[in-house]
Image: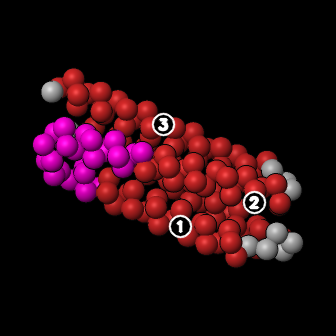
């Protein structure tokens, strides 16, 4: 049983690393892609991938929780709050992207700033929660 828990935790951490890499790409794209239409199209195709990875984090988290007999710890509550925040801001990003006019420089700049803040907070949350869960173990 310990091997299953260890494998599940390693898979969970691997998927968290994939989410961090995708978030870093989104921040990079916010700075480097100048053409607004290209930028919006990239965001349109990357958002479902990011949500899929977040869903995979939830799935592997539930697998780890099931393997450890559903022990409710404070680290689990922190993880649920963090993942809920990430889903909420992703939905908010989608709504803002839909309302953003690519011809309006100001709205595009506000969208880019929101994306930078969102993914910076997401990366910070994933790193802090992962480190805290190992510290509270």
Number of marks drawn: 3
Q: Is residue 30 visible?
A: no
The disc placed on residue 36 is none
Image x and y of residue 118, in percent:
56, 59
Residue 46, given in percent of the width and then of the height, sits at 64, 50
- Which is nearer the eye, 126 or 94? 94
Q: Residues within 10 Å of mark 3 (few under 14, many from 20)?
A: some
Q: Is residue 43 left or right of residue 6?
A: right
Q: Which residues are magenta?
A: 56-78
Q: Assess whether residue 77 is covered by the magenta stretch.
A: yes
Read off the residue under disc 2.
40
What residue is disc 3 on? 17
Circles 1 and 2: CB distance less than 8 Å? no
Percent x, y of residue 35 = 86, 56
Q: How many angstroms separate mark 1 from mark 2 (CA)?
A: 15 Å
Residue at the location (30% across, 33% down)? 8
Report whether 117 appears left or right of 14.
right
Q: Main secondary structure of the magenta part?
A: helix
Label 1: which secondary element: helix
Work out whether mark 1 precedes mark 2 in sequence or the reverse, and give the earlier one: 2
- Look at the image and say whether residue 32 sits in the magenta stretch: no
Which residue bears the numbered disc 1? Answer: 91
Q: Residue at x 51, y 38 (%)?
A: 18
User: Image height check: is 6 above or below 57?
Assistant: above
Provide the secondary structure element on which disc 3 rests: helix
- Residues at circles 3 and 1 in contact by the CB criterion of under 8 Å: no
Q: Secondary structure at mark 2?
A: helix
* CA distance for labels 3 and 1: 21 Å
Distance between the alpha carbons at the discs numbered 2 and 3: 24 Å
Q: Nearer the viewer, residue 65 or 23?
A: 65
Query: Between tags 3 and 1, which lies in front?
Result: 1
């Amino acid at each position: 049983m310990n091997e299953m828990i260890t494998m599940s935790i390693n898979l969970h951490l691997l998927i968290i690393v994939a989410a961090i890499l995708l978030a870093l790409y989104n921040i990079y794209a916010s700075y480097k892609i100048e053409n607004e239409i290209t930028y919006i199209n990239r965001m349109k195709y990357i958002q479902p991938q990011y949500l899929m990875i977040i869903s995979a984090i939830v799935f592997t988290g539930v697998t780890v929780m099931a393997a450890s007999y559903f022990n409710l710890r404070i680290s689990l509550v922190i993880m649920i709050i963090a993942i809920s925040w990430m889903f909420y801001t992703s939905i908010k990003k989608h709504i803002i992207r839909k309302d953003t006019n690519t011809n309006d420089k100001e709205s595009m700049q506000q969208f880019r700033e929101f994306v930078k803040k969102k993914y910076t907070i997401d990366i910070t949350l994933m790193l802090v929660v992962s480190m805290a869960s190992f510290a509270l173990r």
